[in-house]
């Protein structure tokens, strides 16, 4: 990409640009923990090489008259020792003229922070893996010959706006419409704070529990979280308001896309509790709903329904200062339909030559409620949990649902100032 080149942001990015704030920064973090201490000098060189291999992220986001746009930047990201909270603010008035991602390190861990307007978890994970690949190649050139940790997609495919490319004016059933759902009752942390937890357990043990319920891993985890929320619901609403778990879906699994930009939709799994449900019954129900929501025809209709606003001439000619408050309003309305979020990034695989150097991966996403990012590597299942609530009762219920079943769990947490 040459300096001066610019392109429009995708529709998902427009939501993030209109709705970010100091607490819910609309940023996410992906981390890789090595089995050795990070060398920051080599990491800086690896990042420099990676920035040339993935120029799509070397941009500054600007406001136009009608929409935001991204302009190629000559600035270079500088590696720093970790110095701020996960998922920091990476866009806004104080970030003009800046790149919208950062790379930090702490001991053995390499962190990639990205503003969600740039890409989704799939694009971010590939970017992180290319950094790791280049780092290891610089440090161990003989052992890493011929090793690749990326898709090999062409430049045009990487920068493609796949929402626009695959839009087809589909008028089919766009799946479940989420209404108002139960919101966790707890005082929230101060406006600019979130608390982050990281929980590790065995992939095999949790997967066995999910299979025992006749459910996928994602459905099982969603059911456990819903049940954990239900246990803390006030008696007056326990059997009235639905608990709704939002689950982002990678649209690359349904369309032939290799884009490095955003390409996902969210689906909603809801349940109104009667108090007699077992986890086996609930997981089976969640699995059934999930399969219905990710049926190819439903995914296609939902994607087209989301994208069609972009093609209305009346909306396209409305100035940005009018559009942004409207987008923000509907974003808040959608948040009211969600109790919590579970995003399963999935299984991370690396070449055999790389495995001796990697301990684990993890992911987090900023939120205005409770967001669990699920990542698995080898037999290490990791929950990156972001919460804006002072109370940890729901999380205690969630973790106990594993430990009570004999699954060993290791949990760590960040500190917050609860003033």
Image (cartoon, rainbow, N blue to C red):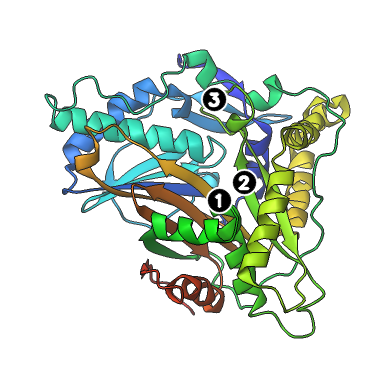
Apparent side of residue 53 relative to residue 208 in the rendered image (left or right): left
Apparent side of residue 177 relative to residue 232 in the rendered image (left or right): right
List x then y, in percent, for residue 61.
55, 33
Instruction: Decide which of 12, 92 is in the foreground and name it.
Output: 12
Q: SS class of the residue under badge 1?
A: strand
Which residue is labeled 3 in the image?
Answer: 259
List x then y, in percent, for residue 41.
17, 37
How far apart are the alpha carbons under marks 3 and 2? 17 Å
Q: Residues within 10 Å of mark 2 (few under 14, many from 20)?
A: some
Which residue is labeled 1 in the image?
Answer: 343
Mark earlier in primary sequence (1, 3): 3
List x then y, in percent, for residue 294.
69, 41
Q: Are marks 3 and 2 in contact (CB under 8 Å)?
A: no
Disc 3 versus disc 2: nearer the observer = 2
Q: Are marks 1 and 3 in contact (CB under 8 Å)?
A: no
Instruction: Decide which of 354, 59 is in the foreground and name it.
Output: 354
List x then y, in percent, for residue 203.
40, 55
Instruction: Identify the residue shown where x is 75% and y is 79%.
Output: 238
Apparent side of residue 303 relative to residue 240 in the rendered image (left or right): left
User: Is residue 109 among what the camera can see?
Assistant: yes
How far apart are the alpha carbons under marks 1 and 3? 19 Å
Which residue is labeled 2 in the image?
Answer: 248
- The residue furthest bottom is 235
| Residue 380 falls in image quadrant | bottom left
- The relative height of residue 80 versus residue 244 in the rendered view (above or below) is above
Mark earlier in primary sequence (1, 2): 2
| Residue 145 falls in image quadrant | top left
Q: Residues within 10 Å of mark 1 (few under 14, many from 20)?
A: many
Instruction: Identify the residue shown where x is 81% and y is 40%.
Output: 174
Q: Are marks 1 and 2 in contact (CB under 8 Å)?
A: yes
How far apart are the alpha carbons under marks 1 and 2? 6 Å
């Amino acid at each position: 990409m040459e300096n001066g080149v610019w392109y429009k942001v995708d529709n998902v990015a427009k939501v993030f640009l209109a709705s970010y704030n100091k607490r819910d920064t609309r940023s996410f973090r992906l981390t890789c923990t090595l089995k050795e201490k990070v060398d920051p000098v080599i990491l800086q060189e690896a990042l420099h090489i990676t920035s040339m291999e993935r120029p799509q992220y070397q941009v500054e986001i600007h406001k136009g008259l009608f929409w935001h746009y991204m302009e190629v930047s000559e600035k270079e990201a500088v590696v720093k020792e970790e110095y701020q909270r996960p998922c920091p603010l990476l866009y806004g008035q104080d970030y003009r003229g800046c790149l919208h991602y950062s790379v930090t390190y702490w001991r053995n861990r390499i962190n990639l922070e990205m503003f969600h307007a740039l890409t989704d978890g799939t694009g971010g994970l590939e970017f992180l893996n290319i950094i790791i690949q280049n780092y290891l190649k610089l440090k161990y050139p003989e052992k890493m010959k011929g090793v690749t940790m990326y898709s090999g997609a062409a430049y045009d495919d990487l920068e493609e706006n796949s929402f626009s490319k695959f839009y087809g004016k589909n008028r089919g059933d766009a799946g479940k419409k989420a209404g108002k759902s139960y919101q966790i009752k707890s005082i929230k942390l101060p406006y600019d704070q979130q608390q982050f937890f990281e929980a590790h357990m065995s992939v095999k043990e949790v997967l066995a529990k999910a299979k025992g319920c006749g459910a996928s891993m994602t459905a099982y985890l969603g059911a456990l979280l819903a049940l954990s929320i239900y246990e803390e619901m006030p008696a007056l609403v326990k059997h009235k308001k639905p608990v709704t778990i939002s689950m982002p879906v990678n649209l690359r699994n349904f369309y032939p896309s290799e884009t490095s930009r955003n390409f996902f939709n969210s689906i909603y799994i809801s349940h109104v509790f009667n108090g007699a449900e077992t986890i086996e019954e609930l997981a089976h129900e969640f699995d059934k709903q999930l399969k219905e929501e990710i049926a190819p025809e439903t995914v296609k209709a939902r994607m087209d329904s989301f994208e069609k606003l972009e093609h209305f001439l009346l909306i396209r000619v409305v100035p940005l200062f009018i559009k942004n408050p409207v987008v923000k309003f509907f974003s808040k309305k959608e948040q009211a339909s969600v109790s919590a979020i579970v995003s399963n990034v999935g299984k991370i695989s690396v070449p055999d030559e790389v495995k001796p150097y990697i301990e684990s991966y993890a992911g987090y996403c900023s939120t205005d409620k409770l967001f669990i990012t699920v990542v698995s590597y080898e037999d290490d299942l990791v929950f990156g949990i972001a919460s804006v609530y002072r109370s940890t009762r729901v999380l205690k219920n969630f973790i106990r649902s594993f430990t009570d079943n004999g699954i060993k769990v290791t949990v760590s947490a960040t500190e917050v100032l609860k003033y």
